[in-house]
Amino acid sequence: MCQRAGRVMKEVLWMKEAARYAREFERIGKRLFAEHLVGGNFGNISVRKGNKGFLVTRTGEYLDVLPEPLFVPLDGPVPEHASSEFRVHREIYRNTPYKAVVHAHPPAAIAASLVLETIIPEDSEGLMFCPRIPVVNGAPGSQEIADNVARALSSSNLVIVRGHGTFSAGRTLDEAFLYTSLAEHSCRVLAMKQNFIAPQSHSEI
Ligand SMILES: [Zn+2]
């Protein structure tokens, strides 16, 4: 009887905790949409859960709607409906101490990744927080993207997968989100800078 009561109590606590994480995921998802860092039902979010695994959004889930995150163990079977990028999240948590990961599709950052090997921000926030943004390759959902992203994040909070999107990590979801926002801001500034350089060189001809 006592054991059963303990089990029920554990389940209630877990349900409360899961609901709290879901609200946090929704809050960050809404920010991603507000800043146009993700569109449609793309992108995914996760948080580390102890040293055994992590909670991640479901595949095809809209990030601005209250989600039902799934627990994915660092080792062992993965739930059927976990995010299609669960391999990337799992590899990050296996190989780094980060506690939260955000994956988004910021358009200027993606465009920059198509032509640059490494992105060197020139705006003040970019220079301060992420003076060198690595760009890596890897097909969506593959082990290659998981390995490349986890390796890059061992020395940077932010990486861009060429032609695909950002993976950013931090001690909290807010920190991971901040790096995602920063990537887009720095890449937009770099792109806009070209608009001011081009007419000048044209008038010199
Ligand atoms: Zn993606």
Image (cartoon, rainbow, N blue to C red):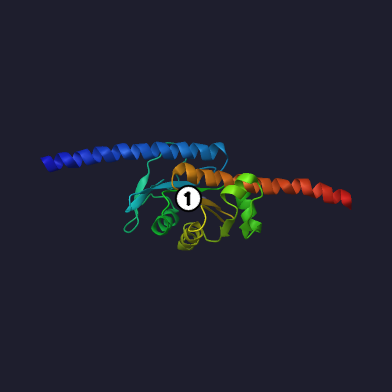
Which image quadrant: the N terminus?
Answer: top left
Would you identify the image quadrant in which residue 68 lies? top left
In the displayed structure, does residue 195 sit left or right of residue 75? right
Q: Does the rendering let one see residue 64?
A: no
Indicate whether 96 appears above or below 192.
Answer: below
Residue at 82% from the left image edge and 47% from the top image edge:
199
Q: Does the rendering let one see residue 19?
A: yes
The answer to which of 130 and 181 lies nearer the viewer is 130
Indicate whether 17 appears above or below 121.
Answer: above
Secondary structure type for disc 1: strand
Crowd tier of the residue under label 1, counting other residues whose Cα lies within 10 Å: few below 14, some 14–19, many 20 or above: many
Q: Position of residue 173 (x, y in %)?
A: 45, 43
Residue at 83% from the left image edge and 48% from the top image edge:
200
Q: Residue furthest right?
A: 205
Judging by the rendered image, the residue that carries numbered circle 1 is: 169
Indicate whether 162 appears above or below 58.
Answer: below
In the displayed structure, does residue 77 sit left or right of residue 36? left
- Which amino acid, mark 1? Ala
Residue at 69% from the left image edge and 48% from the top image edge:
191
